[in-house]
Image: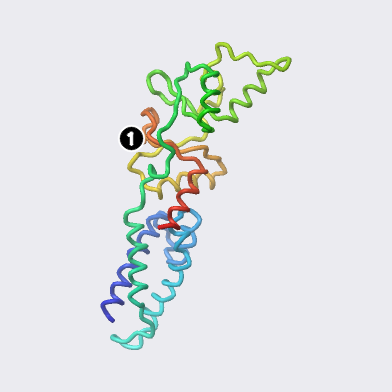
Amino acid sequence: MDEIVERFEITFNQIHQHLKELNGYPKNDNFVELLQRSKLKHSVIRVHFDQLKQYAKLRNAIVHERIRGDYYVATPHLEVVEDLERIKQTLDQPPQALEFATRPVLFFKEDTPLTHVVEAFRKHEISQFPIYTSNHEFLGLLTNDGIVRWIAGALADGHVNMDGITTKDLLGEDNKPNVEFLSSSGSVFELEEHFETSLEAERKLKAVIITEDGDPDLLPMGIVTTWDLIKVDRRTRDD
């Protein structure tokens, strides 16, 4: 039985260390407090929140309510220890962000005619496209909302002249909207952190674009929107 208790305590402490890391090693490193904070940001913690909270109570009983050195008021079942170890394994090796991204990414150059982009919106039912220069420099994210706004501004007598209009013309002055970049080796935790940080700053993040090393001027390997985050929660629950 002591071996099972030892396995439980070691695994619990390792999860505690992960929670500290996910929260930037705050002064208040109480397990339940860190758990509550992490729940707001990370799907893995949300899914296992209730279990981990109960395991924290069990851990307190083991550590603080020991009657003597070799006798515990409460001891974990083997199934509990194995479940805790599975959660810890997920935290040790979280999925890569690229697994939840839309791939391949359809993108356009700055001189692509607007008519071509509108056709792509219709054909592929994608709501946003990264736009690049001929030298692969990232210019911005062209969205269906941006196209609608441009059409509304260009409307005259019920008609819009698209002749000669390119993607660069539609990006406007704010040609670099709320887009962030992540390396292809980045974890789902890093991905969720991008969206959570923007939310805390009251800044709507339209997308995270994944490139080989996180450089904005490399061609995109995947793109993640808030809609894609639903896939993170769904897969975590299925696992």
Which residue position holds label 1? 212
Q: Which residue is drawn at 48% across and 18% down?
A: 112
Pick the quarter of the image with the C terminus. bottom left
Residue 200 versus residue 124 in the image, above or below: below
Tell me which amino acid carries mark 1.
Glu
Pick the quarter of the image with the N terminus. bottom left
Q: Which residue is drawn at 56% across and 23% down?
A: 173
Q: Position of residue 137 (x, y in %)?
A: 40, 23
Q: Residue at x 56, y 15 (%)?
A: 165
Which color mode does the image show? rainbow
Q: Position of residue 93 (x, y in %)?
A: 32, 54
Q: Position of residue 122 (x, y in %)?
A: 55, 28
Count the numbered circles shown: 1
Q: Which of 115 and 153 is in front in this view?
A: 115
Q: Nearer the viewer, residue 179 or 130?
A: 130
**Which quadrant holds residue 146?**
top right
Q: Residue lying furthest front in this view?
A: 123
In this rendering, would 8 be left or right of 177?
left
Residue 12 versus residue 18 in the image, above or below: below
Q: Residue lying furthest right in this view?
A: 157
Q: Which residue is drawn at 48% across and 47% down?
A: 229
Residue 208 versus residue 153 in the image, above or below: below
Numbered disc 1: secondary structure = loop
Q: Position of residue 136 (x, y in %)?
A: 38, 23
